[in-house]
Image: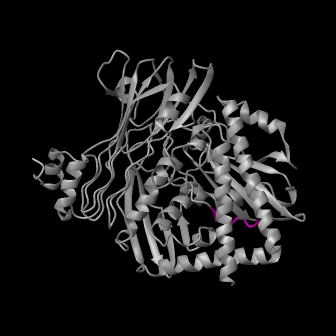
Amino acid sequence: MDMVTMNIIDSTLVSICREMGVTMMKTAYSTIFNEGMDFTCGLGNTNGEMIGVAEFNPSQIGGMPLVLKTTAEEIPHDSIAEGDVIVTNDPYRGGMHTPEHSFIKPVFVDGVLYGYAVAIGHVAEVGGMVPGGFAGEATEIFHEGLRVPPVKIRKAGEDVDEVWKLLLANVRTPRNNYGDFRAMISAVDVGAARLRAVIEKYGAEQFTRTVTDLMDYSETRMRAEIGDIEDGKYSFEDYMEDDGIEAKPYKIHVDVHVQGGEVVVDYSASDSQAKGPINAVLSVAWSSAYNAILHLTDPSIPKNSGCFRPIKIVAPGGTLVNADYPATCVGGNTETHIRIAYTIIGAMAKCVPERAFATDAGTHSNFLFGALDPRHGEYVVCYDFTCAAWGGRPFADGNEAVNCINGNSRMVPIEVFEVRYPWLVEEFKLEPDSAGPGRYRGAHSISKTYRAVDTEITVSSVSDRHAIQPWGLLGGGAGAVGGLLYQDAEGGEWRPFTEAFGKVSPSKFSNARIAPGARVRLTAPGAGGYGPVGERAPEMIAEDLREGWITPQGARRDYGYSGGD
């Protein structure tokens, strides 16, 4: 293989995907795109393989190959024309959950199909039983909004008006959805044009051969990485604390088999699918395994379908990690993905402890709301997530206030949030004494206090880690749990939503009505520590005290340290 040309083409493909993402961010209407960057842009070939991707959302990166393959089964190549754009969001057709919309545009050169430009994004409003689509009390997929099978939203460069009408008639914010869909189409237009130019520059034969070599190269490097790990079976389990319908935990168990340069991730001993919305579908079982392994291997390996080939998945149908239709599954891609990925990391810590790290907060603290905003008379919907604490590592403390392992997204700035939505954010801070202790501690939780202004707001939540702490690793302590509390407009006591609104779960519920003047306080969990607590350097404890990360009481409790008294 021509290594020089291969590396140039690889860098070019990644650059194209980055440009697609910037186009999408700069032209979208919703904060989830233009501030949160909850999307991924990639390129695929005609075999449904991902040949290039940018560094956006990991959960969507791992799910993209299945979306491409299943879409090709329903819309075969011979029925696709230049200028077509396909849209789909169906979790049971290779998608991840209903908010995740995939826009796919074929790339033709001289009338021959060579690949696809793909944009996958979390659309803030998808219809269903709650504003924002995250129904914490959903019991079937039909509660979670409009499911779209692979259909053409544009044919030969022209809009299919009937499809547009159908999509926009089923959501609460048609203007915003229209703008976001146009942004995604703009992204795939850019990707298709740039990929066509690359193929024309190098010639179709050389381009095809080089991309094949690139994926083989990624596969070879991934097999070499796995080959350095001692063969064996490594097991671990963790829990989702409830499903919003029944107040009981759900087990995720993995047996990771490492042998001969391959990894087989077996979920067979996991619990059966839940009644509530924490189920994962097959693409999530794939992407969470890919996500975990990519975090434990050389980050310089080119990201494409080749590096996924040595990773095999066993995910029986009807389980929490591969639910059967018509199970509800909106929380699977945001919350359960995190738990699956860290369960794999926990298992692999037994063979590569120098690469593994303690669990992050384990939830995006998904806070969804909708309201008629009296400032302009339009209905607004927002998917507001709070960034998380990351766990301690073999060489450093965990990172503060970054998105969970499957997100890589950004929080909406408070100034933008208050301009766009009818809330006043009264407090936004990191919580001291919330990090899991250890030789290297985890990061701290974030808390946010909202006050509703001028209008009633309907809120929902799909979160976790309000009862089961994020675990530490190799002797590290657990991080603090999160919480979601309500205070009425009269300034009464802070109460969990189970008490204030009669909900089953404190972290997963639907359609709580927040009156003007009432408050909500959201606290994300902390993260686990890495290594024995007694091995933390005294000067690091003293620095944490000076910086306010821990209190004197916390230093004594967690480390037996009294130097701050």
The answer to which image quadrant residue 379 occupies is top right
Q: Position of residue 23 (x, y in %)?
A: 68, 49
Visible residue check, residue 50: no
Q: Where does residue 187 sit, x and y in percent of width and height?
A: 71, 51
> Picture quarter containing residue 106?
bottom right
- How far across and how far down the image is residue 343, in percent? 41, 60
Image-based side of 365 in relation to 59, left or right = left
Residue 273 image point, x, y percent: 50, 49
Task: Give the quadrant of the N terminus.
Answer: bottom right
Could you tell me if residue 277 is visible in this image? yes
**Residue 392 vertical placement versus 2 (above, below):** above
Q: Horizontally, is 137 left or right of 114 in the view?
A: left
Placement of 535 over or under 177, stated as above or below: below
Number of callouts in the render?
0
| Foreground residue among 211 and 310 | 211
Q: Is residue 383 left or right of residue 206?
A: left
Q: Nearer the viewer, residue 446 or 480?
A: 446
**The one of 91 and 434 positioned closer to us in this rendering:** 434
User: Does residue 446 belong to the magenta stretch?
Assistant: no
Position above or below: 124 against 236: above
Q: Residue at x 28, y 65 (%)?
A: 474
Residue numbers of the magenta segment: 46-53
